[in-house]
Image (cartoon, grey):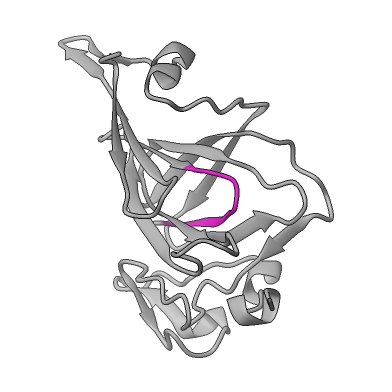
Amino acid sequence: MGQITVIPCGIDGLLEIQPTVHRDARGYFTETYNKRDMDEAGLFMEFVQDNQSASPKGVLRGLHYQKLHPQGKLVRVIRGEVFDVAVDLRAKSPTYGKWHGVVLSAEKQNQFYVPEGFAHGYLVLSDWAEFCYKVTDFYHPGDEGALAFNDPDIAVAWPGLVGDYPGSADPSGYRMEDGTPLVLSAKDAAAPRLGEAFRF
């Protein structure tokens, strides 16, 4: 090994991964994924699909999960900066309902591994961000669930986001500190709280 550094994140299964970045006068080179290095680190996930999205500052995507076909995700940013969040939805986990966030940036080249059993989302912090991720299962239409980004029982501390948090789900009550409005999809704006989505 030696090409990646794996950093546990305080919730079992969540990992920040820092690939080795080789920089010189020409720019940089890095291996964004190497199965041999991942295997040697004890990470044996199999990815079946690569996705990419781009968004301006203030866009919040999430918190998303698949109900019957959960996806593990290896996420990174190739332009700009986002705050990436995972929420533990594993019913028997001692950290059920807890969250962890990582700032991902093109400058740092860091990655975040979110295994199956978590909700996932991110807030764009830079003027523009391009976001890439690998997944361990395909997207299944109709299987996706979402949780409210401002659920007070989860209480994600989204950096730079101010407003009625953790109050109304109306996104018009939220903005970034510089005045940039929060942008949510209609589905995310209507997402239920954790206690409404999961009752054991």
Q: Is residue 162 left or right of residue 44?
A: left
Q: Position of residue 158 (x, y in %)?
A: 37, 68
Is 29 contained in the magenta span? Answer: no
The residue drawn where x is 52% and y is 71% is 149
In the picture as drawn, the residue positioned furthest to the left comes out as: 25
| Residue 32 seen in the figure | no
Q: Is residue 2 left or right of residue 12?
A: left
Q: Is residue 49 left or right of residue 126?
A: right
Report the predominant secondary structure element of the magenta stretch. strand
User: Quadrant of the rendered structure where residue 73 is?
Assistant: top right
Q: Position of residue 94 (x, y in %)?
A: 45, 65
184 vs 173: above or below: above
- Of residues 111 and 11, the one drawn nearer to the viewer in this rendering: 11
66 vs 52: above or below: below
> Image quadrant for the N terminus?
top left
The residue drawn where x is 42% and y is 63% is 99
User: Quadrant of the rendered structure where residue 179 is?
Assistant: bottom left
The residue drawn where x is 38% and y is 54% is 11
Task: Tell me the magenta residue range.
Answer: 114-123
In the picture as drawn, the residue positioned furthest to the right comes out as: 142
The residue drawn where x is 60% and y is 64% is 91
User: Quadrant of the rendered structure where residue 57 is?
Assistant: bottom left
